[in-house]
Amino acid sequence: MRRIFEFIRIKIKDSFDNIHNENLKHNMLQAIPFWIGSVITGIFAVIYAQMFQWGENLMHFIMAWHSWLIFIIAPTAFVLSWWLVNRFAPYAKGSGIPQVMAAVELANPKEHRKITHLLSLKILILKVLSSVILVIGGGAVGREGPTIQIAGSVFRKVNELLPEWWPKISKKNMIMTGAAAGLSAAFNTPLGGIVFAVEELSKTHINYFKTALFTAVIIAGLTAQTFAGSYLYLGYPKTSDIGMMIVFPVILVSGISGIFASQLSRIMLGVNNWKKRLKTDKSNIIFLVISALIIASLAYFVNQEILGSGKGIMQRVLFTDNKNEEWYMPLFRMLGPALSFTSGGAGGIFAPALSAGASIGSVIAGWISLSPDETNVVILTGMVAFLTGITRAPFTSSIIVLEMTDRHSLIFYLMLAAMISSLFSLMVSKHSLYDELKNGYLKDLRKE
Protein backbone atom coordinates (compact mmCIF):
# COMPACT_ATOMS: atom_id res chain seq x y z
CA MET A 1 0.00 0.00 0.00
CA ARG A 2 2.83 2.36 0.84
CA ARG A 3 4.43 1.70 -2.55
CA ILE A 4 1.14 2.49 -4.28
CA PHE A 5 0.86 5.85 -2.50
CA GLU A 6 4.50 6.63 -3.29
CA PHE A 7 3.90 5.77 -6.96
CA ILE A 8 0.82 8.06 -7.06
CA ARG A 9 2.75 10.86 -5.35
CA ILE A 10 5.58 10.65 -7.87
CA LYS A 11 3.16 10.64 -10.81
CA ILE A 12 1.33 13.68 -9.49
CA LYS A 13 4.62 15.52 -8.94
CA ASP A 14 5.77 14.64 -12.46
CA SER A 15 2.49 15.92 -13.89
CA PHE A 16 2.89 19.26 -12.14
CA ASP A 17 6.51 19.50 -13.23
CA ASN A 18 5.27 19.32 -16.83
CA ILE A 19 3.25 22.53 -16.33
CA HIS A 20 5.51 25.31 -17.61
CA ASN A 21 3.42 28.25 -16.33
CA GLU A 22 5.00 28.71 -12.89
CA ASN A 23 2.26 30.99 -11.54
CA LEU A 24 -0.48 28.54 -12.54
CA LYS A 25 1.47 25.66 -11.04
CA HIS A 26 2.02 27.53 -7.77
CA ASN A 27 -1.64 28.59 -7.48
CA MET A 28 -2.93 25.08 -8.17
CA LEU A 29 -0.57 23.54 -5.65
CA GLN A 30 -1.68 26.05 -3.03
CA ALA A 31 -5.37 25.42 -3.75
CA ILE A 32 -5.31 21.60 -3.67
CA PRO A 33 -4.81 21.21 0.13
CA PHE A 34 -7.82 23.48 0.75
CA TRP A 35 -9.94 21.41 -1.64
CA ILE A 36 -8.88 18.12 -0.05
CA GLY A 37 -9.55 19.45 3.45
CA SER A 38 -12.97 20.71 2.37
CA VAL A 39 -14.05 17.36 0.93
CA ILE A 40 -12.91 15.49 4.05
CA THR A 41 -14.63 18.08 6.26
CA GLY A 42 -17.91 17.71 4.36
CA ILE A 43 -17.81 13.92 4.76
CA PHE A 44 -16.92 14.11 8.45
CA ALA A 45 -19.64 16.71 9.07
CA VAL A 46 -22.32 14.42 7.59
CA ILE A 47 -21.13 11.35 9.51
CA TYR A 48 -20.96 13.35 12.74
CA ALA A 49 -24.42 14.84 12.16
CA GLN A 50 -25.86 11.34 11.64
CA MET A 51 -24.18 10.05 14.80
CA PHE A 52 -25.35 13.04 16.83
CA GLN A 53 -28.92 12.67 15.55
CA TRP A 54 -28.79 8.98 16.38
CA GLY A 55 -27.75 9.88 19.92
CA GLU A 56 -30.64 12.32 20.32
CA ASN A 57 -33.09 9.81 18.86
CA LEU A 58 -31.84 7.14 21.26
CA MET A 59 -32.32 9.52 24.19
CA HIS A 60 -35.90 10.31 23.10
CA PHE A 61 -36.62 6.59 22.56
CA ILE A 62 -35.45 5.78 26.09
CA MET A 63 -37.59 8.59 27.54
CA ALA A 64 -40.64 7.28 25.68
CA TRP A 65 -39.91 3.69 26.68
CA HIS A 66 -39.11 4.07 30.39
CA SER A 67 -38.54 7.71 31.34
CA TRP A 68 -37.19 6.79 34.78
CA LEU A 69 -34.07 5.42 33.07
CA ILE A 70 -32.90 9.02 32.62
CA PHE A 71 -31.84 8.95 36.29
CA ILE A 72 -29.35 6.20 35.39
CA ILE A 73 -28.35 7.22 31.88
CA ALA A 74 -27.75 10.93 32.54
CA PRO A 75 -25.19 10.55 35.38
CA THR A 76 -23.45 7.70 33.54
CA ALA A 77 -23.20 9.67 30.30
CA PHE A 78 -22.04 12.89 31.98
CA VAL A 79 -19.27 11.05 33.84
CA LEU A 80 -18.19 8.97 30.83
CA SER A 81 -18.17 12.00 28.51
CA TRP A 82 -16.01 13.95 30.98
CA TRP A 83 -13.69 10.99 31.67
CA LEU A 84 -12.92 10.42 27.98
CA VAL A 85 -11.95 14.05 27.48
CA ASN A 86 -10.13 14.45 30.79
CA ARG A 87 -8.17 11.22 30.32
CA PHE A 88 -7.23 11.38 26.64
CA ALA A 89 -7.69 14.92 25.23
CA PRO A 90 -8.36 17.74 27.74
CA TYR A 91 -8.64 20.38 25.01
CA ALA A 92 -11.48 18.48 23.32
CA LYS A 93 -13.92 19.68 25.97
CA GLY A 94 -16.68 22.17 25.36
CA SER A 95 -17.59 23.83 22.10
CA GLY A 96 -14.37 23.80 20.09
CA ILE A 97 -14.70 27.35 18.77
CA PRO A 98 -12.52 28.90 21.53
CA GLN A 99 -9.91 26.23 20.81
CA VAL A 100 -9.87 27.18 17.12
CA MET A 101 -9.62 30.87 18.03
CA ALA A 102 -6.67 30.05 20.29
CA ALA A 103 -5.05 27.97 17.52
CA VAL A 104 -5.29 30.94 15.14
CA GLU A 105 -3.39 33.09 17.65
CA LEU A 106 -0.77 30.38 18.16
CA ALA A 107 -0.15 30.07 14.41
CA ASN A 108 3.18 31.89 14.55
CA PRO A 109 6.76 30.63 14.26
CA LYS A 110 7.34 30.75 18.00
CA GLU A 111 4.22 28.91 19.22
CA HIS A 112 2.83 26.88 16.32
CA ARG A 113 3.88 23.55 17.86
CA LYS A 114 1.32 24.10 20.64
CA ILE A 115 -1.52 23.95 18.10
CA THR A 116 -1.37 20.14 18.21
CA HIS A 117 -2.93 20.29 21.70
CA LEU A 118 -5.98 22.03 20.21
CA LEU A 119 -6.31 20.51 16.72
CA SER A 120 -5.44 16.89 16.00
CA LEU A 121 -6.92 13.56 14.91
CA LYS A 122 -7.12 12.51 18.56
CA ILE A 123 -9.12 15.65 19.33
CA LEU A 124 -11.40 14.84 16.38
CA ILE A 125 -12.19 11.33 17.59
CA LEU A 126 -12.66 12.29 21.23
CA LYS A 127 -14.82 15.28 20.27
CA VAL A 128 -17.26 13.03 18.43
CA LEU A 129 -17.38 10.27 21.04
CA SER A 130 -17.70 12.56 24.05
CA SER A 131 -20.42 14.78 22.56
CA VAL A 132 -22.52 11.85 21.29
CA ILE A 133 -22.34 10.17 24.69
CA LEU A 134 -23.29 13.41 26.41
CA VAL A 135 -26.35 13.95 24.21
CA ILE A 136 -27.49 10.34 24.77
CA GLY A 137 -27.54 11.21 28.46
CA GLY A 138 -29.72 14.26 27.82
CA GLY A 139 -26.93 16.84 27.72
CA ALA A 140 -28.14 20.13 26.24
CA VAL A 141 -25.32 20.53 23.75
CA GLY A 142 -24.99 20.97 19.99
CA ARG A 143 -22.70 19.61 17.26
CA GLU A 144 -21.93 22.83 15.38
CA GLY A 145 -19.05 24.13 17.53
CA PRO A 146 -17.46 20.66 17.67
CA THR A 147 -17.73 20.42 13.87
CA ILE A 148 -15.65 23.60 13.61
CA GLN A 149 -12.88 22.13 15.78
CA ILE A 150 -13.09 18.88 13.80
CA ALA A 151 -12.70 20.83 10.54
CA GLY A 152 -9.78 22.80 11.95
CA SER A 153 -8.13 19.51 12.92
CA VAL A 154 -8.66 18.11 9.42
CA PHE A 155 -7.18 21.16 7.70
CA ARG A 156 -4.21 21.28 10.09
CA LYS A 157 -3.48 17.59 9.41
CA VAL A 158 -3.73 18.07 5.64
CA ASN A 159 -1.27 20.97 5.89
CA GLU A 160 1.07 18.91 8.05
CA LEU A 161 1.13 16.00 5.57
CA LEU A 162 2.20 18.12 2.60
CA PRO A 163 5.59 16.99 1.22
CA GLU A 164 8.66 19.18 1.52
CA TRP A 165 8.57 20.31 -2.12
CA TRP A 166 5.01 21.63 -1.80
CA PRO A 167 4.58 25.45 -1.62
CA LYS A 168 4.21 26.54 1.99
CA ILE A 169 0.72 27.51 3.14
CA SER A 170 -0.03 29.77 6.10
CA LYS A 171 -1.13 27.71 9.10
CA LYS A 172 -3.36 30.57 10.22
CA ASN A 173 -5.18 30.78 6.88
CA MET A 174 -5.54 27.00 6.76
CA ILE A 175 -7.14 26.87 10.22
CA MET A 176 -9.47 29.82 9.59
CA THR A 177 -10.58 28.36 6.28
CA GLY A 178 -11.17 25.00 7.91
CA ALA A 179 -13.33 26.59 10.59
CA ALA A 180 -15.43 28.36 7.95
CA ALA A 181 -15.82 25.13 5.99
CA GLY A 182 -16.86 23.32 9.17
CA LEU A 183 -19.59 25.81 9.98
CA SER A 184 -20.80 25.77 6.39
CA ALA A 185 -21.07 21.98 6.41
CA ALA A 186 -22.64 21.81 9.89
CA PHE A 187 -25.49 24.26 9.25
CA ASN A 188 -25.54 24.17 5.42
CA THR A 189 -24.89 27.92 5.62
CA PRO A 190 -22.03 28.89 3.27
CA LEU A 191 -22.41 32.64 3.79
CA GLY A 192 -22.49 32.08 7.54
CA GLY A 193 -19.20 30.20 7.31
CA ILE A 194 -17.53 33.02 5.43
CA VAL A 195 -18.85 35.74 7.73
CA PHE A 196 -17.86 33.67 10.79
CA ALA A 197 -14.26 33.39 9.59
CA VAL A 198 -14.03 37.12 8.96
CA GLU A 199 -15.95 38.34 12.02
CA GLU A 200 -14.87 35.87 14.69
CA LEU A 201 -11.48 34.54 13.63
CA SER A 202 -9.69 36.84 11.21
CA LYS A 203 -7.30 39.58 12.18
CA THR A 204 -5.70 39.29 8.75
CA HIS A 205 -6.83 41.20 5.67
CA ILE A 206 -9.28 38.90 3.87
CA ASN A 207 -7.54 39.49 0.52
CA TYR A 208 -4.76 37.16 1.65
CA PHE A 209 -7.02 34.11 1.79
CA LYS A 210 -10.40 35.03 0.31
CA THR A 211 -10.15 32.63 -2.67
CA ALA A 212 -9.24 29.69 -0.44
CA LEU A 213 -11.99 30.66 1.99
CA PHE A 214 -14.72 30.89 -0.64
CA THR A 215 -13.77 27.69 -2.45
CA ALA A 216 -13.38 25.70 0.79
CA VAL A 217 -16.81 26.78 2.04
CA ILE A 218 -18.41 25.88 -1.29
CA ILE A 219 -16.68 22.49 -1.59
CA ALA A 220 -17.40 21.51 2.04
CA GLY A 221 -21.05 22.51 1.65
CA LEU A 222 -21.44 20.67 -1.67
CA THR A 223 -19.78 17.56 -0.24
CA ALA A 224 -22.16 17.58 2.72
CA GLN A 225 -25.13 18.06 0.39
CA THR A 226 -23.95 15.19 -1.80
CA PHE A 227 -24.22 12.79 1.14
CA ALA A 228 -27.03 14.39 3.18
CA GLY A 229 -29.03 16.00 0.37
CA SER A 230 -29.91 19.65 -0.13
CA TYR A 231 -31.66 20.82 3.00
CA LEU A 232 -32.37 23.74 5.30
CA TYR A 233 -31.32 23.28 8.92
CA LEU A 234 -34.83 24.26 10.03
CA GLY A 235 -37.14 24.87 7.04
CA TYR A 236 -39.41 27.61 5.72
CA PRO A 237 -41.43 29.24 8.53
CA LYS A 238 -44.35 31.42 7.44
CA THR A 239 -43.61 35.12 7.99
CA SER A 240 -45.65 36.88 5.31
CA ASP A 241 -48.50 38.45 7.31
CA ILE A 242 -46.60 41.05 9.36
CA GLY A 243 -46.61 44.83 9.69
CA MET A 244 -44.14 47.46 10.86
CA MET A 245 -45.47 47.28 14.42
CA ILE A 246 -43.59 44.00 14.80
CA VAL A 247 -40.47 46.12 15.34
CA PHE A 248 -41.44 46.76 18.97
CA PRO A 249 -41.76 43.08 20.02
CA VAL A 250 -38.53 42.41 18.11
CA ILE A 251 -36.68 45.07 20.10
CA LEU A 252 -38.15 43.76 23.38
CA VAL A 253 -37.22 40.14 22.70
CA SER A 254 -33.76 41.10 21.43
CA GLY A 255 -32.92 43.14 24.52
CA ILE A 256 -34.09 40.41 26.91
CA SER A 257 -32.30 37.69 24.93
CA GLY A 258 -29.07 39.69 24.88
CA ILE A 259 -29.15 40.21 28.64
CA PHE A 260 -30.00 36.56 29.37
CA ALA A 261 -27.36 35.24 26.97
CA SER A 262 -24.63 37.42 28.40
CA GLN A 263 -25.66 36.48 31.92
CA LEU A 264 -25.61 32.79 30.98
CA SER A 265 -22.06 33.25 29.67
CA ARG A 266 -21.00 34.79 32.97
CA ILE A 267 -22.58 31.94 34.91
CA MET A 268 -20.84 29.30 32.81
CA LEU A 269 -17.49 31.05 33.15
CA GLY A 270 -18.04 31.29 36.89
CA VAL A 271 -18.81 27.58 37.14
CA ASN A 272 -15.71 26.78 35.07
CA ASN A 273 -13.54 28.87 37.38
CA TRP A 274 -15.10 27.27 40.45
CA LYS A 275 -14.53 23.79 39.01
CA LYS A 276 -10.78 24.44 38.88
CA ARG A 277 -10.85 24.11 42.67
CA LEU A 278 -12.00 20.49 42.29
CA LYS A 279 -8.62 18.81 42.37
CA THR A 280 -9.69 15.15 42.55
CA ASP A 281 -11.63 12.88 40.18
CA LYS A 282 -14.02 12.06 43.00
CA SER A 283 -15.06 15.69 43.51
CA ASN A 284 -15.51 16.15 39.74
CA ILE A 285 -17.66 13.02 39.51
CA ILE A 286 -19.84 14.22 42.39
CA PHE A 287 -20.37 17.53 40.60
CA LEU A 288 -21.25 15.73 37.36
CA VAL A 289 -23.70 13.35 39.02
CA ILE A 290 -25.47 16.23 40.77
CA SER A 291 -25.66 18.20 37.50
CA ALA A 292 -27.02 15.20 35.61
CA LEU A 293 -29.60 14.45 38.31
CA ILE A 294 -30.84 18.05 38.25
CA ILE A 295 -31.42 17.82 34.49
CA ALA A 296 -32.95 14.34 34.82
CA SER A 297 -35.33 15.48 37.58
CA LEU A 298 -36.55 18.49 35.61
CA ALA A 299 -37.02 16.33 32.51
CA TYR A 300 -38.89 13.59 34.41
CA PHE A 301 -41.10 15.73 36.64
CA VAL A 302 -41.61 18.95 34.61
CA ASN A 303 -40.72 18.97 30.90
CA GLN A 304 -38.51 16.74 28.74
CA GLU A 305 -37.60 19.63 26.45
CA ILE A 306 -34.73 20.54 28.77
CA LEU A 307 -32.89 17.59 27.18
CA GLY A 308 -30.83 17.62 24.00
CA SER A 309 -29.78 20.32 21.58
CA GLY A 310 -33.20 21.99 21.44
CA LYS A 311 -33.68 21.65 17.69
CA GLY A 312 -37.03 19.96 18.33
CA ILE A 313 -38.24 23.06 20.19
CA MET A 314 -37.31 25.32 17.28
CA GLN A 315 -39.09 23.07 14.79
CA ARG A 316 -42.24 22.85 16.92
CA VAL A 317 -42.67 26.54 17.67
CA LEU A 318 -41.92 27.53 14.06
CA PHE A 319 -43.88 24.88 12.15
CA THR A 320 -46.82 23.76 14.28
CA ASP A 321 -49.82 25.42 15.93
CA ASN A 322 -48.24 24.77 19.35
CA LYS A 323 -46.17 27.97 19.27
CA ASN A 324 -46.22 29.23 22.85
CA GLU A 325 -43.86 27.85 25.47
CA GLU A 326 -44.43 27.78 29.21
CA TRP A 327 -42.86 30.70 31.06
CA TYR A 328 -40.16 28.51 32.61
CA MET A 329 -38.82 27.01 29.37
CA PRO A 330 -36.32 29.82 28.65
CA LEU A 331 -34.86 29.17 32.10
CA PHE A 332 -34.74 25.42 31.41
CA ARG A 333 -33.07 25.99 28.04
CA MET A 334 -30.40 28.05 29.81
CA LEU A 335 -29.98 25.75 32.81
CA GLY A 336 -29.54 22.64 30.64
CA PRO A 337 -26.68 24.11 28.56
CA ALA A 338 -25.12 25.69 31.65
CA LEU A 339 -24.81 22.32 33.39
CA SER A 340 -23.92 20.40 30.22
CA PHE A 341 -21.40 22.88 28.83
CA THR A 342 -19.53 23.09 32.13
CA SER A 343 -19.48 19.31 32.60
CA GLY A 344 -16.05 19.02 30.98
CA GLY A 345 -17.37 16.80 28.19
CA ALA A 346 -17.50 17.84 24.53
CA GLY A 347 -20.48 19.70 23.12
CA GLY A 348 -21.35 23.00 21.52
CA ILE A 349 -23.51 25.95 22.50
CA PHE A 350 -24.76 27.12 19.06
CA ALA A 351 -27.93 25.00 18.85
CA PRO A 352 -28.78 25.34 22.58
CA ALA A 353 -28.38 29.12 22.27
CA LEU A 354 -30.72 29.20 19.28
CA SER A 355 -33.31 27.11 21.14
CA ALA A 356 -33.07 29.37 24.22
CA GLY A 357 -33.70 32.41 22.04
CA ALA A 358 -36.60 30.64 20.32
CA SER A 359 -38.21 29.83 23.68
CA ILE A 360 -37.86 33.46 24.85
CA GLY A 361 -39.47 34.69 21.64
CA SER A 362 -42.24 32.10 21.96
CA VAL A 363 -43.08 33.06 25.55
CA ILE A 364 -43.16 36.81 24.89
CA ALA A 365 -45.19 36.36 21.68
CA GLY A 366 -47.76 34.42 23.71
CA TRP A 367 -47.96 37.10 26.37
CA ILE A 368 -48.76 39.84 23.84
CA SER A 369 -51.01 37.62 21.67
CA LEU A 370 -49.26 37.88 18.32
CA SER A 371 -50.49 36.13 15.17
CA PRO A 372 -48.75 32.90 14.07
CA ASP A 373 -46.66 34.67 11.40
CA GLU A 374 -45.73 37.48 13.79
CA THR A 375 -44.82 34.88 16.40
CA ASN A 376 -42.44 33.24 13.91
CA VAL A 377 -40.71 36.56 13.29
CA VAL A 378 -40.27 37.17 17.02
CA ILE A 379 -38.98 33.61 17.51
CA LEU A 380 -36.41 33.99 14.74
CA THR A 381 -35.19 37.34 16.05
CA GLY A 382 -34.95 35.84 19.54
CA MET A 383 -32.71 33.10 18.10
CA VAL A 384 -30.44 35.68 16.45
CA ALA A 385 -30.34 37.81 19.59
CA PHE A 386 -29.48 34.99 21.98
CA LEU A 387 -26.77 33.60 19.70
CA THR A 388 -25.34 37.12 19.36
CA GLY A 389 -25.29 37.52 23.14
CA ILE A 390 -23.23 34.32 23.42
CA THR A 391 -20.87 34.80 20.48
CA ARG A 392 -20.81 38.63 20.13
CA ALA A 393 -20.81 37.98 16.38
CA PRO A 394 -23.96 39.79 15.19
CA PHE A 395 -23.43 39.39 11.45
CA THR A 396 -22.65 35.69 11.78
CA SER A 397 -25.75 35.13 13.91
CA SER A 398 -28.00 37.02 11.48
CA ILE A 399 -26.70 35.25 8.40
CA ILE A 400 -26.86 31.78 9.99
CA VAL A 401 -30.54 32.14 10.96
CA LEU A 402 -31.29 33.73 7.59
CA GLU A 403 -29.73 30.80 5.69
CA MET A 404 -31.16 28.03 7.87
CA THR A 405 -34.72 29.31 7.27
CA ASP A 406 -34.41 31.02 3.83
CA ARG A 407 -36.26 34.09 5.15
CA HIS A 408 -34.43 36.78 3.18
CA SER A 409 -37.31 39.21 3.63
CA LEU A 410 -36.48 39.35 7.34
CA ILE A 411 -32.85 40.38 6.98
CA PHE A 412 -33.40 43.86 8.45
CA TYR A 413 -35.32 42.50 11.45
CA LEU A 414 -32.63 39.88 12.06
CA MET A 415 -29.83 42.44 11.88
CA LEU A 416 -31.81 44.79 14.13
CA ALA A 417 -32.14 41.97 16.66
CA ALA A 418 -28.38 41.30 16.50
CA MET A 419 -27.56 44.98 16.99
CA ILE A 420 -29.93 45.40 19.96
CA SER A 421 -28.61 42.21 21.55
CA SER A 422 -25.00 43.37 21.13
CA LEU A 423 -25.76 46.61 22.95
CA PHE A 424 -27.64 44.97 25.83
CA SER A 425 -25.21 42.09 26.27
CA LEU A 426 -22.32 44.55 26.57
CA MET A 427 -24.06 46.06 29.60
CA VAL A 428 -23.75 42.70 31.37
CA SER A 429 -20.31 41.59 30.22
CA LYS A 430 -17.68 43.26 28.05
CA HIS A 431 -16.21 40.06 26.57
CA SER A 432 -17.84 37.08 24.89
CA LEU A 433 -17.87 33.55 26.26
CA TYR A 434 -15.58 32.40 23.44
CA ASP A 435 -13.04 35.16 24.06
CA GLU A 436 -12.82 34.36 27.76
CA LEU A 437 -12.42 30.62 27.11
CA LYS A 438 -9.87 31.26 24.36
CA ASN A 439 -7.78 33.39 26.71
CA GLY A 440 -7.94 30.62 29.30
CA TYR A 441 -6.67 28.04 26.82
CA LEU A 442 -3.86 30.33 25.68
CA LYS A 443 -2.84 30.97 29.27
CA ASP A 444 -2.75 27.25 30.07
CA LEU A 445 -0.80 26.35 26.92
CA ARG A 446 1.74 29.11 27.40
CA LYS A 447 2.32 27.92 30.95
CA GLU A 448 3.08 24.45 29.61
Image (tube, rainbow, N blue to C red):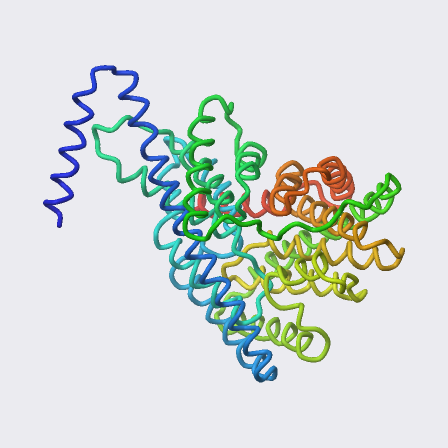
Image spot of residue 304 (x, y percent): 66, 73
Residue for point 39% across, 50% down: 43
Looking at the picture, tell me which residue is in the foreground, 321 or 309: 321
Is the residue 26 above or below the residue 7 in the image? above
Is the residue 347 above or below the residue 6 in the image? below
Image spot of residue 190 (x, y percent): 52, 39
Image spot of residue 168 (x, y percent): 30, 27
Tell me which corner region of the image, top left, top right, bottom left or bottom right, holds residue 165. Answer: top left
Looking at the picture, tell me which residue is in the foreground, 282 or 302: 302
Residue for point 71% across, 80% down: 301
Looking at the picture, tell me which residue is in the foreground, 388 or 286: 388
Is the residue 98 above or below the residue 330 in the image? above
Residue for point 88% across, 59% down: 367
Looking at the picture, tell me which residue is in the foreground, 211 or 387: 211
Is the residue 44 above or below the residue 152 in the image? below
Question: For this view, does 374 lie left or right of residue 74?
Answer: right
